[in-house]
Image (tube, grey):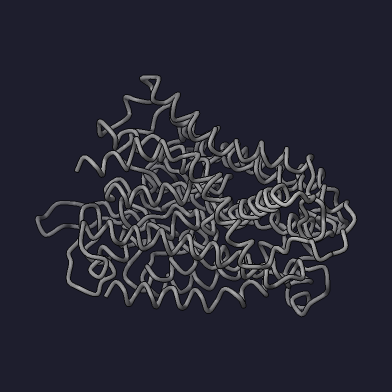
Amino acid sequence: MSIVSIIVSLVIIGLMVKPTGVYLASVFGDKPTKLDRIFGGFEHVLYRISGVKKENQSWKLYALSFLLVNVATLLMAYLVFRFQGVLPLNPSHIRGMESSLAFNTAISFMANTNLQHYSGETGLSYLSQMIGIVFLMFISPATALAAVMAIIRGLAGKNVGNFFVDLTRSLTRVFLPIAFVSGLVFVFLGVPQTLDATAEATTVTGEQQQIARGPVAAFLAIKEVGNNGGGFFGANSTHPFENPGGISNFLQIWLMMLLPTALPFAYGKMVGNRKQGRILFTIMAVMFAIMLVVSLTSEFNGSSVLQSLGMKDGLGSMEGKETRIGVGDSAFYSVVTTAAETGAVNTMHDTLTPIGGMVTLMNMMLNTVFGGVGAGFINVLMYCLVAVFLSGLMVGRTPEFLGKKVEGCEMKIIAVTLLIHPLLILGASAIALWTPLGSESISNPGFHGLTQIVYEYTSSAANNGSGFEGLGDATLFWNISTGLVMFFGRCFSIIAMIAVAGSLAKKQVVPETIGTFRTDTSLFGGILLGSILIVGALTFFPTLVLGPVAEFLTL
Protein backbone atom coordinates (compact mmCIF):
# COMPACT_ATOMS: atom_id res chain seq x y z
CA MET A 1 0.00 0.00 0.00
CA SER A 2 3.01 2.32 0.08
CA ILE A 3 2.50 3.58 -3.46
CA VAL A 4 -1.18 4.26 -2.82
CA SER A 5 -0.67 6.23 0.41
CA ILE A 6 2.22 8.22 -1.07
CA ILE A 7 0.31 9.13 -4.24
CA VAL A 8 -2.79 10.10 -2.26
CA SER A 9 -0.67 12.26 0.04
CA LEU A 10 1.04 14.00 -2.88
CA VAL A 11 -2.26 14.61 -4.68
CA ILE A 12 -3.84 16.20 -1.59
CA ILE A 13 -0.74 18.34 -1.05
CA GLY A 14 -0.84 19.37 -4.72
CA LEU A 15 -4.49 20.42 -4.50
CA MET A 16 -3.72 22.79 -1.63
CA VAL A 17 -0.60 24.57 -2.88
CA LYS A 18 -2.24 27.19 -5.10
CA PRO A 19 -5.11 28.17 -2.74
CA THR A 20 -2.67 28.41 0.16
CA GLY A 21 -0.28 30.50 -1.93
CA VAL A 22 -3.07 32.90 -2.92
CA TYR A 23 -4.07 33.18 0.74
CA LEU A 24 -0.49 34.00 1.79
CA ALA A 25 -0.28 36.67 -0.91
CA SER A 26 -3.48 38.21 0.43
CA VAL A 27 -2.21 38.13 4.01
CA PHE A 28 0.99 40.00 3.16
CA GLY A 29 -0.26 42.15 0.31
CA ASP A 30 -0.34 45.95 0.49
CA LYS A 31 -4.04 46.23 -0.36
CA PRO A 32 -6.99 45.93 2.06
CA THR A 33 -8.71 42.54 1.98
CA LYS A 34 -11.64 40.78 3.65
CA LEU A 35 -9.11 39.30 6.07
CA ASP A 36 -8.82 42.73 7.68
CA ARG A 37 -12.44 42.47 8.85
CA ILE A 38 -11.68 39.16 10.58
CA PHE A 39 -8.27 39.82 12.08
CA GLY A 40 -7.86 43.58 11.88
CA GLY A 41 -9.49 44.46 15.19
CA PHE A 42 -7.46 42.00 17.23
CA GLU A 43 -4.25 43.03 15.46
CA HIS A 44 -4.99 46.71 16.10
CA VAL A 45 -5.21 45.97 19.82
CA LEU A 46 -1.85 44.18 19.68
CA TYR A 47 -0.27 47.13 17.85
CA ARG A 48 -1.55 49.59 20.46
CA ILE A 49 -0.35 47.46 23.39
CA SER A 50 3.10 46.91 21.88
CA GLY A 51 3.46 50.44 20.49
CA VAL A 52 3.94 49.26 16.89
CA LYS A 53 3.39 51.88 14.23
CA LYS A 54 2.42 50.50 10.84
CA GLU A 55 5.09 52.47 9.01
CA ASN A 56 7.38 51.13 6.32
CA GLN A 57 10.93 50.39 7.45
CA SER A 58 14.19 50.56 5.56
CA TRP A 59 15.78 47.20 4.85
CA LYS A 60 18.39 47.88 7.53
CA LEU A 61 15.78 48.59 10.21
CA TYR A 62 13.76 45.56 9.06
CA ALA A 63 16.81 43.30 9.36
CA LEU A 64 17.73 44.77 12.73
CA SER A 65 14.19 44.18 14.01
CA PHE A 66 14.36 40.57 12.80
CA LEU A 67 17.67 40.03 14.59
CA LEU A 68 16.66 41.71 17.86
CA VAL A 69 13.42 39.73 18.15
CA ASN A 70 15.30 36.48 17.62
CA VAL A 71 17.97 37.36 20.18
CA ALA A 72 15.37 38.51 22.74
CA THR A 73 13.39 35.26 22.46
CA LEU A 74 16.64 33.29 22.69
CA LEU A 75 17.54 34.95 25.99
CA MET A 76 14.05 34.45 27.39
CA ALA A 77 14.08 30.73 26.53
CA TYR A 78 17.57 30.29 27.98
CA LEU A 79 16.46 31.68 31.34
CA VAL A 80 13.35 29.49 31.41
CA PHE A 81 15.41 26.36 30.71
CA ARG A 82 18.02 27.23 33.32
CA PHE A 83 15.51 27.92 36.09
CA GLN A 84 12.76 25.45 35.24
CA GLY A 85 13.53 23.53 38.43
CA VAL A 86 12.19 26.37 40.60
CA LEU A 87 9.47 27.58 38.23
CA PRO A 88 5.83 26.39 38.28
CA LEU A 89 4.18 23.73 36.06
CA ASN A 90 6.85 21.18 36.88
CA PRO A 91 4.90 18.25 38.40
CA SER A 92 7.69 15.77 37.58
CA HIS A 93 10.25 17.94 39.43
CA ILE A 94 12.68 18.18 36.51
CA ARG A 95 15.85 20.10 37.36
CA GLY A 96 17.16 23.15 35.52
CA MET A 97 19.19 22.53 32.38
CA GLU A 98 22.97 22.60 32.38
CA SER A 99 24.22 25.90 30.92
CA SER A 100 25.66 24.65 27.60
CA LEU A 101 22.60 22.47 26.98
CA ALA A 102 20.28 25.40 27.74
CA PHE A 103 22.36 27.55 25.33
CA ASN A 104 22.07 24.92 22.59
CA THR A 105 18.35 24.32 23.13
CA ALA A 106 17.46 28.01 23.20
CA ILE A 107 19.33 28.70 19.95
CA SER A 108 17.94 25.53 18.42
CA PHE A 109 14.31 26.56 18.84
CA MET A 110 15.01 30.23 18.10
CA ALA A 111 16.64 29.20 14.81
CA ASN A 112 13.69 26.99 13.79
CA THR A 113 16.11 24.03 13.95
CA ASN A 114 14.84 22.17 17.03
CA LEU A 115 17.93 20.03 17.37
CA GLN A 116 17.50 18.17 20.66
CA HIS A 117 20.48 17.14 22.77
CA TYR A 118 18.09 16.26 25.59
CA SER A 119 15.34 13.66 25.98
CA GLY A 120 12.00 15.36 25.41
CA GLU A 121 9.92 13.83 28.17
CA THR A 122 12.63 13.95 30.86
CA GLY A 123 14.56 17.11 29.93
CA LEU A 124 11.88 19.80 30.15
CA SER A 125 9.07 20.80 32.49
CA TYR A 126 5.60 21.61 31.18
CA LEU A 127 6.38 25.32 31.55
CA SER A 128 9.54 24.93 29.48
CA GLN A 129 7.65 22.94 26.85
CA MET A 130 4.95 25.61 26.55
CA ILE A 131 6.82 28.88 27.17
CA GLY A 132 10.34 28.01 26.09
CA ILE A 133 9.51 25.61 23.26
CA VAL A 134 5.99 26.10 21.86
CA PHE A 135 6.29 29.90 22.08
CA LEU A 136 9.50 29.80 20.05
CA MET A 137 7.88 27.33 17.66
CA PHE A 138 5.43 30.09 16.76
CA ILE A 139 7.84 33.04 16.78
CA SER A 140 10.68 31.41 14.85
CA PRO A 141 8.81 30.40 11.67
CA ALA A 142 6.78 33.61 11.85
CA THR A 143 9.97 35.70 11.67
CA ALA A 144 11.19 33.69 8.66
CA LEU A 145 7.83 33.99 6.90
CA ALA A 146 7.88 37.73 7.54
CA ALA A 147 11.42 37.97 6.15
CA VAL A 148 10.67 36.11 2.92
CA MET A 149 7.66 38.38 2.30
CA ALA A 150 9.87 41.44 2.79
CA ILE A 151 12.34 40.01 0.30
CA ILE A 152 9.60 39.30 -2.25
CA ARG A 153 8.35 42.89 -1.92
CA GLY A 154 11.86 44.23 -2.42
CA LEU A 155 12.38 42.11 -5.53
CA ALA A 156 9.05 43.38 -6.85
CA GLY A 157 10.27 46.97 -6.45
CA LYS A 158 8.20 47.78 -3.37
CA ASN A 159 9.17 48.84 0.12
CA VAL A 160 10.14 45.86 2.27
CA GLY A 161 7.37 46.71 4.76
CA ASN A 162 7.28 46.66 8.55
CA PHE A 163 8.74 43.63 10.36
CA PHE A 164 6.41 43.82 13.37
CA VAL A 165 3.32 44.04 11.17
CA ASP A 166 4.48 41.06 9.13
CA LEU A 167 5.32 39.14 12.30
CA THR A 168 1.89 39.82 13.76
CA ARG A 169 0.11 38.78 10.57
CA SER A 170 2.21 35.61 10.37
CA LEU A 171 1.01 34.65 13.82
CA THR A 172 -2.62 35.77 13.75
CA ARG A 173 -3.52 34.92 10.14
CA VAL A 174 -1.34 31.89 9.42
CA PHE A 175 0.16 29.90 12.28
CA LEU A 176 -2.38 30.33 15.08
CA PRO A 177 -5.47 29.38 13.01
CA ILE A 178 -3.80 26.38 11.35
CA ALA A 179 -2.20 25.17 14.59
CA PHE A 180 -5.47 25.56 16.55
CA VAL A 181 -7.53 23.50 14.08
CA SER A 182 -4.88 20.83 13.51
CA GLY A 183 -4.27 20.60 17.27
CA LEU A 184 -7.94 19.74 17.80
CA VAL A 185 -7.69 17.11 15.07
CA PHE A 186 -4.65 15.57 16.75
CA VAL A 187 -6.57 15.40 20.05
CA PHE A 188 -9.42 13.64 18.22
CA LEU A 189 -6.87 11.15 16.81
CA GLY A 190 -5.63 10.29 20.30
CA VAL A 191 -2.73 12.66 20.96
CA PRO A 192 -2.63 13.67 24.68
CA GLN A 193 -3.34 17.25 25.75
CA THR A 194 -3.08 17.55 29.52
CA LEU A 195 -1.18 19.27 32.32
CA ASP A 196 -1.43 16.25 34.62
CA ALA A 197 1.77 14.69 35.93
CA THR A 198 3.34 11.49 34.63
CA ALA A 199 0.88 8.60 34.87
CA GLU A 200 1.68 5.41 36.77
CA ALA A 201 0.63 2.03 35.42
CA THR A 202 1.08 -1.57 36.47
CA THR A 203 2.43 -3.79 33.69
CA VAL A 204 1.32 -7.39 33.00
CA THR A 205 4.34 -8.58 34.98
CA GLY A 206 3.30 -6.55 38.01
CA GLU A 207 5.98 -3.87 37.62
CA GLN A 208 5.29 -0.14 38.00
CA GLN A 209 5.77 1.97 34.90
CA GLN A 210 5.95 5.76 34.52
CA ILE A 211 4.11 6.98 31.41
CA ALA A 212 5.04 10.48 30.27
CA ARG A 213 2.32 12.73 28.89
CA GLY A 214 1.55 16.44 28.67
CA PRO A 215 0.25 19.14 26.29
CA VAL A 216 1.40 17.11 23.28
CA ALA A 217 -1.29 18.00 20.72
CA ALA A 218 -0.61 21.76 20.92
CA PHE A 219 3.11 21.03 20.62
CA LEU A 220 2.64 18.68 17.66
CA ALA A 221 0.47 21.04 15.61
CA ILE A 222 2.94 23.94 15.49
CA LYS A 223 5.85 21.51 15.37
CA GLU A 224 4.75 20.42 11.89
CA VAL A 225 3.11 23.47 10.31
CA GLY A 226 5.96 25.70 11.48
CA ASN A 227 8.59 23.28 10.14
CA ASN A 228 10.03 23.07 13.64
CA GLY A 229 10.44 19.35 14.16
CA GLY A 230 11.42 18.91 17.78
CA GLY A 231 9.71 16.07 19.60
CA PHE A 232 7.73 16.37 22.83
CA PHE A 233 9.04 12.86 23.49
CA GLY A 234 12.61 11.77 22.86
CA ALA A 235 11.39 9.27 20.27
CA ASN A 236 9.75 12.12 18.31
CA SER A 237 7.07 10.96 15.86
CA THR A 238 7.90 7.30 16.37
CA HIS A 239 6.19 7.63 19.77
CA PRO A 240 2.52 6.45 19.66
CA PHE A 241 1.41 9.46 21.71
CA GLU A 242 2.94 11.78 19.12
CA ASN A 243 1.95 9.76 16.06
CA PRO A 244 -0.93 7.40 16.88
CA GLY A 245 -1.51 5.97 13.39
CA GLY A 246 -1.70 6.35 9.64
CA ILE A 247 -4.03 9.37 9.62
CA SER A 248 -1.87 11.32 12.06
CA ASN A 249 1.20 10.34 10.01
CA PHE A 250 -0.40 11.74 6.85
CA LEU A 251 -1.57 14.91 8.65
CA GLN A 252 1.98 15.56 9.83
CA ILE A 253 3.34 15.18 6.29
CA TRP A 254 0.63 17.48 4.93
CA LEU A 255 1.33 20.16 7.54
CA MET A 256 5.07 20.01 6.89
CA MET A 257 4.58 20.59 3.16
CA LEU A 258 1.66 23.06 3.32
CA LEU A 259 3.47 26.40 3.51
CA PRO A 260 6.80 25.62 1.76
CA THR A 261 5.02 24.32 -1.35
CA ALA A 262 2.64 27.30 -1.40
CA LEU A 263 5.29 30.03 -1.27
CA PRO A 264 6.16 29.93 -5.02
CA PHE A 265 2.51 30.65 -5.85
CA ALA A 266 2.38 33.46 -3.28
CA TYR A 267 5.55 34.85 -4.84
CA GLY A 268 4.10 34.68 -8.36
CA LYS A 269 1.02 36.65 -7.35
CA MET A 270 2.94 39.24 -5.33
CA VAL A 271 5.47 40.04 -8.09
CA GLY A 272 2.82 39.98 -10.82
CA ASN A 273 4.28 36.98 -12.67
CA ARG A 274 2.36 33.83 -11.79
CA LYS A 275 4.11 31.84 -14.51
CA GLN A 276 7.47 32.42 -12.86
CA GLY A 277 6.02 31.14 -9.57
CA ARG A 278 4.89 27.97 -11.33
CA ILE A 279 8.35 27.51 -12.83
CA LEU A 280 9.98 27.75 -9.39
CA PHE A 281 7.47 25.29 -7.93
CA THR A 282 8.12 22.86 -10.78
CA ILE A 283 11.89 22.91 -10.27
CA MET A 284 11.55 22.22 -6.56
CA ALA A 285 8.96 19.50 -7.23
CA VAL A 286 11.30 17.79 -9.72
CA MET A 287 14.13 17.72 -7.18
CA PHE A 288 11.74 16.39 -4.53
CA ALA A 289 10.49 13.63 -6.85
CA ILE A 290 14.04 12.52 -7.67
CA MET A 291 14.98 12.38 -3.99
CA LEU A 292 11.82 10.42 -3.15
CA VAL A 293 12.33 7.78 -5.85
CA VAL A 294 16.00 7.29 -4.89
CA SER A 295 15.11 6.96 -1.20
CA LEU A 296 12.28 4.48 -1.80
CA THR A 297 14.44 2.36 -4.09
CA SER A 298 17.27 2.26 -1.56
CA GLU A 299 15.11 1.58 1.48
CA PHE A 300 13.57 -1.43 -0.14
CA ASN A 301 17.05 -2.88 0.11
CA GLY A 302 17.92 -3.74 -3.45
CA SER A 303 14.40 -4.61 -4.58
CA SER A 304 13.34 -3.63 -8.05
CA VAL A 305 11.92 -0.19 -8.68
CA LEU A 306 8.44 -1.70 -8.81
CA GLN A 307 8.97 -3.26 -5.41
CA SER A 308 10.31 -0.01 -4.00
CA LEU A 309 7.12 1.71 -5.12
CA GLY A 310 4.98 -0.91 -3.41
CA MET A 311 3.72 -2.52 -6.63
CA LYS A 312 5.29 -5.89 -5.77
CA ASP A 313 5.89 -7.63 -2.51
CA GLY A 314 9.14 -6.57 -0.90
CA LEU A 315 9.93 -6.41 2.79
CA GLY A 316 12.69 -3.84 2.45
CA SER A 317 14.98 -2.57 5.19
CA MET A 318 12.96 -2.65 8.43
CA GLU A 319 15.86 -1.64 10.67
CA GLY A 320 14.88 1.37 12.78
CA LYS A 321 11.37 1.53 11.30
CA GLU A 322 7.94 1.07 12.86
CA THR A 323 6.02 -1.98 11.66
CA ARG A 324 2.77 -0.01 11.93
CA ILE A 325 4.11 2.59 9.47
CA GLY A 326 6.21 0.43 7.15
CA VAL A 327 9.20 1.02 4.92
CA GLY A 328 7.54 3.07 2.19
CA ASP A 329 5.83 5.63 4.42
CA SER A 330 8.93 5.82 6.64
CA ALA A 331 11.14 6.64 3.65
CA PHE A 332 8.52 9.12 2.40
CA TYR A 333 8.46 10.83 5.79
CA SER A 334 12.27 11.04 5.89
CA VAL A 335 12.34 12.77 2.49
CA VAL A 336 9.53 15.18 3.42
CA THR A 337 10.99 16.15 6.79
CA THR A 338 14.41 16.98 5.32
CA ALA A 339 13.03 18.57 2.14
CA ALA A 340 10.74 20.81 4.20
CA GLU A 341 13.55 21.35 6.76
CA THR A 342 11.31 20.22 9.60
CA GLY A 343 13.40 17.58 11.34
CA ALA A 344 10.55 15.48 12.75
CA VAL A 345 11.21 11.76 12.34
CA ASN A 346 9.07 8.64 12.35
CA THR A 347 12.10 6.45 11.78
CA MET A 348 15.67 6.72 13.03
CA HIS A 349 17.73 8.27 10.23
CA ASP A 350 20.89 6.65 11.57
CA THR A 351 19.42 3.29 10.50
CA LEU A 352 18.57 4.34 6.94
CA THR A 353 20.46 2.62 4.16
CA PRO A 354 23.56 4.55 3.03
CA ILE A 355 21.81 5.96 -0.04
CA GLY A 356 18.63 6.68 1.91
CA GLY A 357 20.71 8.59 4.44
CA MET A 358 22.48 10.40 1.61
CA VAL A 359 19.12 11.61 0.28
CA THR A 360 18.27 13.22 3.60
CA LEU A 361 21.72 14.82 3.67
CA MET A 362 21.38 16.18 0.12
CA ASN A 363 17.98 17.71 0.89
CA MET A 364 19.56 19.69 3.71
CA MET A 365 22.77 20.50 1.87
CA LEU A 366 20.87 21.96 -1.09
CA ASN A 367 18.32 23.60 1.26
CA THR A 368 16.17 24.40 -1.79
CA VAL A 369 14.03 21.25 -2.16
CA PHE A 370 11.10 23.41 -0.95
CA GLY A 371 12.94 24.06 2.34
CA GLY A 372 11.42 25.36 5.56
CA VAL A 373 8.87 28.15 6.03
CA GLY A 374 10.46 31.13 4.32
CA ALA A 375 14.12 30.17 4.68
CA GLY A 376 14.07 27.55 1.90
CA PHE A 377 12.38 29.83 -0.60
CA ILE A 378 14.83 32.59 0.28
CA ASN A 379 17.59 30.24 -0.88
CA VAL A 380 15.66 29.50 -4.09
CA LEU A 381 15.43 33.24 -4.81
CA MET A 382 19.17 33.53 -4.17
CA TYR A 383 19.84 30.82 -6.76
CA CYS A 384 17.48 32.62 -9.17
CA LEU A 385 19.75 35.65 -9.00
CA VAL A 386 22.79 33.40 -9.52
CA ALA A 387 21.13 31.82 -12.57
CA VAL A 388 20.25 35.24 -14.00
CA PHE A 389 23.79 36.49 -13.42
CA LEU A 390 25.35 33.46 -15.13
CA SER A 391 22.94 33.77 -18.05
CA GLY A 392 23.78 37.45 -18.43
CA LEU A 393 27.49 36.69 -18.53
CA MET A 394 27.00 34.06 -21.23
CA VAL A 395 25.15 36.41 -23.59
CA GLY A 396 27.09 39.55 -22.70
CA ARG A 397 24.19 41.47 -21.15
CA THR A 398 23.72 43.07 -17.77
CA PRO A 399 21.71 40.52 -15.75
CA GLU A 400 18.13 41.53 -14.97
CA PHE A 401 15.59 40.01 -12.61
CA LEU A 402 12.00 41.25 -12.41
CA GLY A 403 13.05 44.30 -14.40
CA LYS A 404 15.93 45.26 -12.06
CA LYS A 405 19.62 45.14 -12.95
CA VAL A 406 21.58 42.65 -10.82
CA GLU A 407 25.01 44.23 -10.37
CA GLY A 408 28.23 43.70 -8.47
CA CYS A 409 26.93 44.84 -5.08
CA GLU A 410 24.16 42.25 -4.98
CA MET A 411 26.30 39.44 -6.38
CA LYS A 412 29.06 40.03 -3.82
CA ILE A 413 26.55 39.59 -1.01
CA ILE A 414 25.12 36.47 -2.65
CA ALA A 415 28.58 35.00 -3.28
CA VAL A 416 29.53 35.37 0.39
CA THR A 417 26.16 33.92 1.43
CA LEU A 418 26.65 30.91 -0.83
CA LEU A 419 29.97 30.21 0.88
CA ILE A 420 28.64 30.47 4.44
CA HIS A 421 26.41 27.36 4.27
CA PRO A 422 29.13 24.88 3.14
CA LEU A 423 31.74 26.62 5.30
CA LEU A 424 29.64 26.11 8.42
CA ILE A 425 29.02 22.44 7.59
CA LEU A 426 32.41 21.38 6.27
CA GLY A 427 34.48 23.62 8.52
CA ALA A 428 32.72 22.51 11.70
CA SER A 429 32.86 18.87 10.58
CA ALA A 430 36.61 19.12 9.97
CA ILE A 431 37.17 20.55 13.46
CA ALA A 432 35.02 17.81 15.02
CA LEU A 433 36.97 15.09 13.20
CA TRP A 434 40.31 16.70 14.07
CA THR A 435 39.70 16.97 17.80
CA PRO A 436 38.95 14.04 20.14
CA LEU A 437 36.11 16.12 21.60
CA GLY A 438 34.22 15.47 18.38
CA SER A 439 35.60 12.19 17.05
CA GLU A 440 35.14 10.31 20.34
CA SER A 441 31.37 10.83 20.06
CA ILE A 442 31.17 8.65 16.94
CA SER A 443 29.37 5.37 17.66
CA ASN A 444 30.10 3.71 14.30
CA PRO A 445 33.66 3.57 12.94
CA GLY A 446 34.53 4.15 9.32
CA PHE A 447 32.41 5.84 6.68
CA HIS A 448 29.21 5.83 8.70
CA GLY A 449 30.96 7.68 11.53
CA LEU A 450 31.94 10.44 9.10
CA THR A 451 28.32 10.68 7.97
CA GLN A 452 27.15 10.99 11.57
CA ILE A 453 29.27 14.09 12.13
CA VAL A 454 28.50 15.70 8.76
CA TYR A 455 24.79 15.04 9.27
CA GLU A 456 24.81 16.75 12.67
CA TYR A 457 26.28 19.98 11.31
CA THR A 458 24.27 19.84 8.08
CA SER A 459 21.08 19.52 10.10
CA SER A 460 22.20 22.46 12.26
CA ALA A 461 23.15 24.76 9.39
CA ALA A 462 20.01 23.96 7.39
CA ASN A 463 17.64 24.62 10.33
CA ASN A 464 16.45 21.02 10.19
CA GLY A 465 17.21 19.44 13.57
CA SER A 466 16.97 15.74 12.77
CA GLY A 467 20.03 13.69 13.60
CA PHE A 468 21.91 10.45 13.13
CA GLU A 469 21.09 9.57 16.71
CA GLY A 470 24.00 7.20 17.16
CA LEU A 471 26.19 10.28 17.68
CA GLY A 472 26.97 11.09 21.32
CA ASP A 473 26.16 14.78 20.99
CA ALA A 474 25.07 15.73 24.54
CA THR A 475 28.47 17.21 25.43
CA LEU A 476 29.89 20.70 25.92
CA PHE A 477 31.70 20.57 22.57
CA TRP A 478 28.63 19.59 20.57
CA ASN A 479 26.29 21.92 22.45
CA ILE A 480 28.46 24.98 21.77
CA SER A 481 29.60 24.13 18.23
CA THR A 482 26.17 23.19 16.88
CA GLY A 483 24.65 26.17 18.70
CA LEU A 484 26.94 28.56 16.84
CA VAL A 485 26.35 26.81 13.51
CA MET A 486 22.57 27.05 14.03
CA PHE A 487 22.70 30.75 14.87
CA PHE A 488 24.84 31.83 11.91
CA GLY A 489 23.18 29.37 9.54
CA ARG A 490 19.83 30.89 10.39
CA CYS A 491 20.52 34.60 10.53
CA PHE A 492 23.22 35.24 7.93
CA SER A 493 21.38 34.18 4.78
CA ILE A 494 18.10 35.83 5.78
CA ILE A 495 19.70 39.17 6.63
CA ALA A 496 21.89 39.03 3.51
CA MET A 497 18.90 38.48 1.22
CA ILE A 498 16.96 41.28 2.93
CA ALA A 499 19.93 43.50 2.04
CA VAL A 500 19.84 42.32 -1.58
CA ALA A 501 16.08 42.92 -1.77
CA GLY A 502 16.52 46.39 -0.25
CA SER A 503 19.18 47.22 -2.82
CA LEU A 504 17.05 46.04 -5.77
CA ALA A 505 13.97 47.87 -4.46
CA LYS A 506 15.74 51.20 -4.90
CA LYS A 507 16.60 50.60 -8.57
CA GLN A 508 14.60 51.82 -11.51
CA VAL A 509 12.72 49.27 -13.60
CA VAL A 510 14.50 48.53 -16.89
CA PRO A 511 12.07 48.38 -19.86
CA GLU A 512 11.76 44.91 -21.35
CA THR A 513 13.26 44.54 -24.84
CA ILE A 514 13.63 41.74 -27.37
CA GLY A 515 17.00 40.93 -25.80
CA THR A 516 15.68 40.60 -22.25
CA PHE A 517 16.22 37.14 -20.82
CA ARG A 518 12.84 35.98 -19.54
CA THR A 519 12.76 34.24 -16.18
CA ASP A 520 9.36 32.60 -16.57
CA THR A 521 10.31 30.01 -19.18
CA SER A 522 11.36 26.37 -19.06
CA LEU A 523 14.81 27.46 -20.28
CA PHE A 524 15.31 29.57 -17.17
CA GLY A 525 13.98 26.69 -15.09
CA GLY A 526 16.65 24.43 -16.55
CA ILE A 527 19.37 26.97 -15.88
CA LEU A 528 18.11 27.42 -12.31
CA LEU A 529 18.15 23.66 -11.72
CA GLY A 530 21.66 23.47 -13.17
CA SER A 531 22.82 26.32 -10.94
CA ILE A 532 21.49 24.60 -7.83
CA LEU A 533 23.10 21.29 -8.73
CA ILE A 534 26.43 22.72 -9.88
CA VAL A 535 26.92 25.35 -7.20
CA GLY A 536 25.16 23.48 -4.41
CA ALA A 537 25.58 19.76 -4.98
CA LEU A 538 29.16 19.73 -6.27
CA THR A 539 30.32 21.64 -3.20
CA PHE A 540 29.43 18.64 -1.03
CA PHE A 541 30.15 15.86 -3.53
CA PRO A 542 33.55 14.82 -2.07
CA THR A 543 32.04 14.58 1.41
CA LEU A 544 29.17 12.44 0.15
CA VAL A 545 31.64 10.15 -1.62
CA LEU A 546 33.71 9.70 1.54
CA GLY A 547 30.59 9.07 3.64
CA PRO A 548 27.40 7.39 2.41
CA VAL A 549 28.63 6.48 -1.09
CA ALA A 550 31.75 4.75 0.28
CA GLU A 551 29.63 2.96 2.89
CA PHE A 552 27.25 1.77 0.17
CA LEU A 553 30.13 0.42 -1.96
CA THR A 554 31.50 -1.59 0.96
CA LEU A 555 28.21 -3.40 1.71
Q: Quadrant of the N terminus?
A: bottom left
Q: Quadrant of residue 177?
A: bottom right
Q: Quadrant of the C terminus?
A: top left
Most extreme residue toward the left is 205
Residue 321: % across, % down: 25, 57
Classify residue 242 as left or right of residue 302: right
Classify residue 106 as left or right of residue 470: right
| Residue sitting at x 48%, y 42% | 538
| Residue sitting at x 46%, y 43% | 459
Q: Nearer the viewer, residue 513 or 453?
A: 513
- Asked whether the viewer can see residue 295, the reply is yes
Residue 498: % across, % down: 74, 48
Classify residue 218 as left or right of residue 360: right
Q: Nearer the viewer, residue 8 or 68?
A: 8
| Residue sitting at x 11%, y 55% | 206
Total tally of numbered discs in the picture: 0
Residue 533: % across, % down: 51, 50
Compared with residue 344, is residue 36 higher up or lower down, i.e. above or below?
Answer: below
Residue 399: % across, % down: 76, 51
Compared with residue 479, is residue 26 higher up or lower down, i.e. above or below?
Answer: below
